[in-house]
Amino acid sequence: MRLLDGKLAVIAGVANKMSIAWGIAKAYHEQGATIALFCLESNLRRVTKLAKELNIDHVFPFDARNDQSIVEAFESLNTLFNGKLHILVHSIAYAQVEDIGNEFINVSKSGWNLALEVSAFSLVTFCKCARPMMNAAGEGSIIAMTFGGGEKVVPGYNIMGVAKAALNMSIQYLAYDLGPENIRVNGIASGPIKTMSSLMVKDFSNSLGLMEVQSPLLRNVTLEDVSGSALYLASNLSSGISGSIIKVECGMNSVLSPSVPHQRYK
Ligand SMILES: NC(=O)c1ccc[n+]([C@@H]2O[C@H](COP(=O)([O-])OP(=O)(O)OC[C@H]3O[C@@H](n4cnc5c(N)ncnc54)[C@H](O)[C@@H]3O)[C@@H](O)[C@H]2O)c1
């Protein structure tokens, strides 16, 4: 018996093989889940082709800037899974390059709204759509990807840090709302991993370098590290865990103030 045998899962956020969502899809596939993917409309062809590698036949397009497109993706999922869903993974985020590369004080109102809409509010819409399907399944586990820059300043992360702070609190309030229905909501705060999104973050390679010399495990986080924790949160092994954020960053959070110079001194 595998950990996710009989479970129906939807994973949002595969862009390519480097995506955290792809690592999670592989782990869930190996453990027996039936999987559908949601992806950004413009990635549909590429992701549909990639999905075949895991025998995933259903990839539904959506755009987190458009609530109706999320509703329509869930309507398709509802038909595919006969009204039931056990696992939902939210692994999407977006901010304009100019809003993460410059001083935070100069963030535009439209850039702020866009980052929070795509990276945090979409989780609320996802949960609203998943709720009846998880109720029909009798249980649910919802997992969102977050980052330590939502708790403390990570130079260069800026508006994404604010969006992650909103996401982190949304995880907790959603867990409170949905807990009585046996639906759990948790987050994973991953350390830095090289992906299409993370490469947009200024000084990202510095963060990777610091992990190798400052983290207790003296290495960077891998997709397998993150997908292992996502597997645990999706499975019944974590049945008593909700409203939590698991830090998968090689112990970095336990080390006092990493010694990086202020960005003005570079
Ligand atoms: N890579 C890291 O270092 C790291 C660390 C901690 C947390 N995270 C988080 O992990 C999640 C996945 O990121 P990733 O690193 O795998 O990068 P990625 O680029 O592979 O994934 C980001 C996904 O967000 C999707 N997306 C962006 N705008 C969208 C929109 N308007 N509608 C629908 N989808 C949209 C992209 O298409 C992409 O699939 C994000 O929430 C990210 O903040 C990443």
Image (spheres, helix red, strand yellow):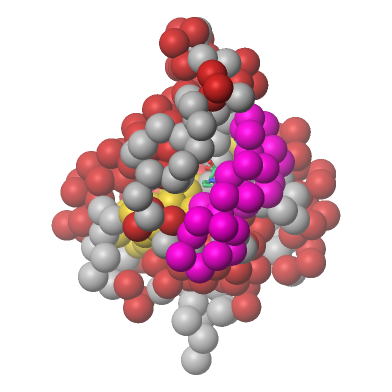
Question: Which quadrant does the C terminus fall into?
Answer: top right
Residue, x 43% and y 56% (percent of image)? 252
Query: Is-magenta flag for residue 211?
Result: yes
Q: Residue furthest bottom?
A: 1
Q: How many numbered circles does the render carry? A: 0
Residue 148 point in image, percent of width and height: 42, 44
Query: Is-magenta flag for residue 143?
Result: no
Query: In the shown orientation, is residue 43 left or right of residue 130?
Result: right
Query: In the shown orientation, is residue 214 left or right of residue 37?
Result: left
Q: What stretch is highlighted in magenta?
A: 191-219
Query: In the shown orientation, is residue 98 left or right of residue 120?
Result: right
Residue, x 72% and y 53% (percent of image)? 18
Q: In this view, does 155 lie above or below 98?
A: below
Residue 124 point in image, percent of width and height: 37, 37
Query: In the shown orientation, is residue 196 left or right of residue 157?
Result: right
Residue 142 point in image, percent of width and height: 39, 55
Q: Is residue 76 visible?
A: no
Residue, x 81% and y 44% (percent of image)? 45
Picture quarter containing residue 239?
bottom left
Residue 22 point in image, percent of width and height: 66, 58
Nearest the viewer among 218 and 106 is 218
Q: Is residue 152 visible?
A: yes
Q: In this view, does 96 lie above or below 147?
A: above
Q: In which quarter of the image is ligand 1?
A: top right
Q: In this view, does 90 lie above or below 235?
A: above
Nearest the viewer among 212 and 36 is 212
Residue, x 31% and y 65% (percent of image)? 139
